[in-house]
Structure formats: C-alpha cells, structure tokens
Image: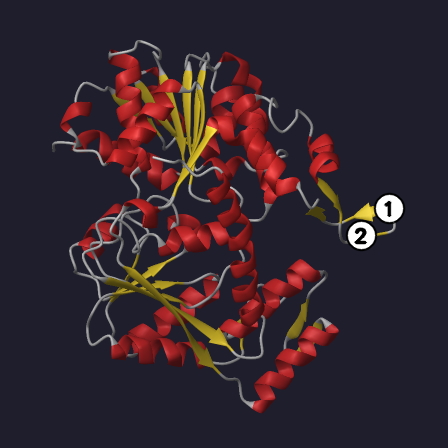
Amino acid sequence: MQYNPHNYQRFASEYIEQNPIAAVFLDMGLGKTIITLTAINDLLFDNFDAHRILVIAPLRVARDTWPDELGKWEHLSDLRFSVAVGTETERKTALRNKADIHIINRENVQWLVEDSGIPWQWDMVVIDELSSFKSHQSKRFRALMKVRPKIKRIVGLTGTPSSNGLMDLWAQFRLLDMGQRLGRFIGKYRTDYFIPDKRNGQVIFSYKPLPDAERRIYDNISDITISMKSTDHLQMPKLVTSEHTVNLDESEQERYDSFKKTLVMDISDGEITAANAAALSGKLSQMANGAVYADNGEYIHIHDRKLDALEDIIESMSGKPLLVAYWFKHDLERIIERLQKRHIPFSKMDTADSIKRWNNGEVMVALIHPASAGHGLNLQSGGNTLVWFGLTWSLELYQQTNARLWRQGQNAETVIVQHIVTKGTIDGQIMTALAKKDKTQSDLIAAVKANI
C-alpha cells in the first residue's frame, strides 16, 4: 500500500529523525507506528544515523501490530525485522536473526539485558507505550537503564504520559535523557516539584505538585517533546459517553454500606476481609459489579443489576456488534453464563483469530479486558459501541480501550461509550477520579503541543 502521510505525520517523522532523544506523545489513532517506522527507514537508508533498532512494546502490539504495519506499506519493504516473542528458544532465535529491527515485548526486557546471553547490539531503541516504564522500581526500568549509555537514539511513544499525575514523568524522562531535564534522582525530583500531601507522622503516602510545578516541568522537557491530539488533526467521529445507572435494592445497599464501614462482611461459608484501603477499593468495585471474592478464592454472588443492564443494552443493539469491557475474572464468568443462558453469541478478544472475526463483523458481542487489549489493537472496523461493565482506576487503560473504537479508520460517524454504574457505590468515585486525572494529563499535552 502506498503511504501518503498527513502533514502532522510527516512532521512527527522528521522530528524523530532530527532529535536523538524524542518523547512523542501521540493521541490514539494518529498512527504512531507508521510515523516511527518511516523515521527508522530514513535513518537507516538515507541518513545512515542508525544501524540496528530494538522496538519494545506490549506483547500483542509486538506480536501483531508492528509486523502488520511493516508488511503493509510499500516504502518499508526493504526493512528486515524479527519478532522475539514466545519461548526462550524462540526469542533467542529471533534475536540472532540478521534484521534491521528486532521487536520484543516489554516483559522480556530484563531477560534480554541480564539473562539472554546475547550481547547488546542496538544503537536505537523505540519504546512503544513509554508510560509502561513510569515506575523507577520496576525490573524493566532498571534493566534498560543498565544499557542506556550504549543507546545513541531513543524514542518514547505514548498517548498517556501522566495518567496518574506528574510523578509518573520522572522515570520516563530519566530513561530518555538519563536525568538531564528532571534530575537523576527521584528524591530530588520530589523535592523540586512536590510537597508532601497525605502522611502519618514521618510516613508520607502521597505528594502534590507545587503551584508552579507543572509549568517548570513542561518547560524543562519541551525541547525533546512533542504532543498531538487526534481531534486537532483528524476528522474523528463524534464521541458520545453516557452512564447507564442501576440501583441496588435496600438489602443489597445495606450489605454494601456495612462492608464499606466495617471492612468485614460475614458470609455463610467464610469471611471476606479488606486489610487496607486498596484492597477495600477492589472489594467494593467487585460488589458494585455484582460479586466479590471470598478469602477462599471463591466468589460470592451479590446482585445481577449490571448483568440485567448489559442484557438490556445488547437487546437494544438489535444485532449490531457490541464491545464489552470487563475487569474481574468473575465478571467474565458471570457475563458468559448470562450470554449462554440467553443464547447470545459472543467471543473473547484474546486471539488474533477472534480480533479478525470481530473486524469482519462476525461477532455480535466481544468481551475485552483492558489490561491485555488496551494498547495497539485495531478494532474500529468491527463496531462503534463500547460498554464498560466494570470500571478501572487506570486512566491509561481506560483511554486506550476507548481508542480501540474511537480512532482513525472508524467508519461510523459516532462512537458510543457507555458505562454501567451502580448508584451509591464506588463506581461514582471512579468516574470522578478518571475525570480529575484527565485534567493533569490534558494540561501536559497542551503545554508541549506541537505547533504545525
């Protein structure tokens, strides 16, 4: 296929070529893969500024998306690539293949650097979903930092650089520029830009930015960072979001409120406990969805309000395809049980074949987990409606999952994202938190926005 880039795509490719360190914050659907591959192609064969490239990406994106893009465009036909996923033997074989580009999933970065026995040979690294390196304590971050001095060119790609606030940025830029802009140590970064927020004596649980922190951070990273929003450059379909509210009956609400208050709910065959706030949050989210795991690993049925709502939504679709995002394993089990009982055809989006069938219009109801399918998958050909059965606190996974449908290539004029929300539960707090987190990220994007 002939590649006819948009102006913003040409600009972004040239930016990568001209900057040995590049943080490229591209909104979902702008074509970050083809933009980067075009730059790689020029760097290899025109400028001779790169010789061997390593692409690090989420598993499915490494396995499917990058190879698909490499095989799709005519101008990339000379690029040799090898995908290093699978068993250790398969990965080693792929990495020993003579190729311009080696592609590996992020979970195997530590293995590659520390355990594979393969000498480091890549002078350019592309990190697809840079935000997955936001923790400076993660093994993948520490492993990549060991070889960072050997890397002459590095590109960080993401659409959600600060999904949980400005603190996320330090590790990402430490990896990119080795600490030149935001400092070499997380402690100094905290001191320079934040003050303690929630604490218990000398124990600090969270930090909040100083009044001028955002502006100073944006100023410091702006020389190696560009950002683009899809709505500025594409004729995107209209995005319509809504809430489908369900109500617990009096006994169900009392059970929920009691557990929230006491952190313990007695049940007939065991006890459910929530030892801390994070665990409690998970338990309350489960209860809002209709079931909760007990200490013995079994789940206890609470209500069917969301299942009933989902069934109503499916019926209202009148046979049109529907993408359903679930969070907990028991959500999936109960959804499947209800669909089978109603003889509603469905498929889990967990294989290349299921994704192909969805995009061909052969799947009526598709079940997707944000953590395994949030990044990189192109699902816009199969439908234009997404329902969140269970919500997530992660803005990154939330936005990325929505972008499977709301993206370039979506044929429908409108994309509908509906949230099944249980009134009087933690669902409302999650929706509010996602909105608040989005403001910080939107400010970041706007501050380093490229003027084309």
Q: Amino acid at mark 2?
A: Arg
- Residue drawn at x 33%, y 30% as measured from the top left: 12
Mark 2 is surrounded, within 10 Å at the Cα level, by few (under 14), some (14 to 19) or many (20 or more) other residues, namely few
Q: Is residue 96 left or right of residue 69?
A: right
Q: Nearer the viewer, residue 192 or 42?
A: 192
Rendered location of residue 76, percent (x, y): 20, 24
Reply above or below: 273 against 210: below
Which residue is disc 1 drawn over?
Answer: 202
For residue 261, what is the image quadrant?
Answer: bottom right
Residue 254's disc number: none
Reply above or below: 143 against 320: above
Residue 199's disc number: 2
Rendered location of residue 228, percent (x, y): 38, 41
- Residue drawn at x 20%, y 61% as measured from the top left: 412
Pointer 1 and pointer 2: residues touching (CB < 8 Å)?
Answer: yes
Q: Distance between the Cα atoms at labels 1 and 2?
A: 7 Å
Q: Is residue 319 left or right of residue 111?
A: left
Q: Amino acid at mark 1?
A: Gln
Rendered location of residue 435, percent (x, y): 52, 60
- Give the number of callouts: 2
- Looking at the rendered structure, the secondary structure element under dot 2 is strand
Q: Residue furthest bottom?
A: 250
Q: Is residue 36 visible?
A: no
